[in-house]
């Protein structure tokens, strides 16, 4: 990453961090910055999260490792990560009208982890997300082996978890990711 792009991203992340203190109580920006400076690859992943509409922000610290956790905090599922089926097997199963890709492949390319249901619900305690969209989440192997995949959203003041065929895709469904630094 070029110095100017790095500096602009760091400034954007710091501004978002300072504007949303309720997301990361007890974490100082200086701690975040030090971790980011020590892990240059993390900035590449954060840049990918940002450029695809994720608006990443710090949402906490891992109690076991001490890692600082970034997560997509855009109000709606990131616009640059929608209209994707769940995984490569689902993509390959489509005979026509294939989407551009899959959630699991894109998240791996970005170097981020797809949220699981617990992580998604924890994110929803920090704000109201996906009021008009939905987001794919990690799907247990038993569900996936039967052809399904899970997604979540917030409606009527509640967080819901649903299922769909893994090969399905929608313009209003994307995915949220997280990155431990």
Image (cartoon, rainbow, N blue to C red):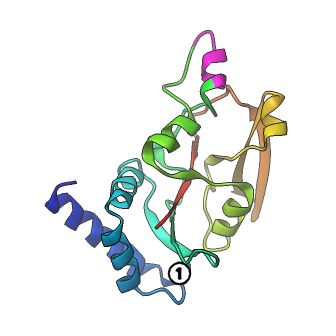
> Which residue is depicted at the point 71% across and 30% down?
166
Residue 141: quadrant of the picture: top right
Q: Is residue 172 above or below residue 85?
A: below
Q: Is residue 117 above or below residue 26?
A: above
- Tell me the quarter of the picture where residue 87 sits: top right
Task: List x then y, in percent, for residue 117.
Answer: 73, 56
Q: Is residue 100 left or right of residue 145?
A: left
Q: Is residue 85 left or right of residue 33?
A: right
Reading the image, the residue beneath label 1 is: 24
In the displayed structure, 98 sits above or below 17; it is above
Q: Is 90 within the magenta? A: yes
Q: Quadrant of residue 169?
A: top right
Residue located farthest toward the bottom when viewing the structure as drawn:
26
Query: Quick one: quadrant of the N terminus?
Result: bottom left
Image coords of residue 73 (percent x, y): 51, 63
Residue positioned 44% across, 46% down in the render: 110
Of residues 47 and 155, the one nearer the viewer is 47
Query: Magenta segment range?
Result: 89-96
Q: Residue at x 47, y 79 (%)?
A: 20
| 111 with respect to 173 (left or right) | left
By secondary structure, the bulk of the magenta-drawn segment is best described as helix
For label 1, the crowd category at 10 Å Cα-Cα, with few meaning under 14, some 14 to 19 and many 20 or more, is many
């Amino acid at each position: 990453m070029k110095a100017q792009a790095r500096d602009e991203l760091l400034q954007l992340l710091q501004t978002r961090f300072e504007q949303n203190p309720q997301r990361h109580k007890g974490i100082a920006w200086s701690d975040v910055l030090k971790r980011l400076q020590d892990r240059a690859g993390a900035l590449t992943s954060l840049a990918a999260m940002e450029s695809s509409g994720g608006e990443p922000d710090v949402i906490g610290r891992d109690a076991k490792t001490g890692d600082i956790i970034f997560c997509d905090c855009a109000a709606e599922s990131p616009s640059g990560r929608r209209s994707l089926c769940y995984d490569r097997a689902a993509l390959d199963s489509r005979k026509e009208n294939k989407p551009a890709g899959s959630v699991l492949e894109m998240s791996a390319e970005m170097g981020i982890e797809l949220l699981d249901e617990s992580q998604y619900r924890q994110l929803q305690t920090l704000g109201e997300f996906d009021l008009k969209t939905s987001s794919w989440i990690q799907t247990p192997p038993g569900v996936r082996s039967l052809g399904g995949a899970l997604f979540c959203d917030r409606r009527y003041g509640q967080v819901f978890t649903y299922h769909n065929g893994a090969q399905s895709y929608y313009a209003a469904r994307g995915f949220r990711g997280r990155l431990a630094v």
